[in-house]
Amino acid sequence: MNKPKSIFIQKNKEFILVQTYLRGLISIVDPSQEFNYLSPNTSFETFGKVIKDKLLASRNIELEEFYLIFKSPEFNSLSERLEIEQQNLYGYKNRKSIYRNMDFLSIDMEEKRFVITPHHQDSLDGFTCVRDKEGNAIEFEYPLTLSDEELGAVTMKAFDYCTSIYRR
């Protein structure tokens, strides 16, 4: 069975950033993708289309390719380059101001469903899954037949479940 296609989404009051994952030894952000910032007020239809496009770009990679990417300067400087870009675009003064009010979630596209997982921010740019009272990860499952607008809407709703050590 193939690994699911996967994306990672960051959202704060200034922007939404949808990033394609490559699935190898572990999931990593594809450093060669185009990084486009969406307004938090983007229509559900546009947001859903971007999500589907980024999911379709996700792919499995062999171990050799994983190591080539993981050891590349492009990959190792990616976070810093994106943070500098965000500071220039949105006037942030430092990393803390970028991530302080950030929500994170991931979406997997499996054979017959989307799985949306809200995350808990446990450090500036670190996260784990949000858990219910029994300790189970909170996940939302939807059929692949969702329209772009429906996918955008349920993804925005899933952000309501994101938590953070900075917002208690």
Image (spheres, rainbow, N blue to C red):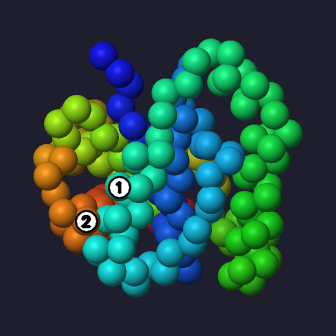
Q: Position of residue 117 (x, y in %)?
A: 33, 46
**Quarter location, residue 67:** top right
Q: Which mark is residue 5?
A: none
Q: Is residue 102 visible?
A: no
Q: Please state if 61 lies on the left or on the right of 162 as rendered.
A: right
Is residue 37 shown to the viewer in this render? yes
User: Looking at the image, which residue is at 76% across and 74% down?
Assistant: 87
Mark 2–mark 1 distance (CA, rounded to whole Å) = 8 Å
Query: Which quadrant, please, contains the N terminus?
Result: top left
Question: What residue is shown at x 69% (from left), y 82% (from top)?
Answer: 90
- Which element is circle 1 on? helix
Is label 2 in contact with label 1 (beta carbons under 8 Å)?
Answer: yes
Amino acid on which disc 2 is placed:
Asp
Which mark is on residue 52?
1
Compared with residue 41, is residue 47 higher up or lower down, i.e. above or below? above
What is the tally of numbered marks visible in this picture? Answer: 2
Residue 148 numbered tag? 2
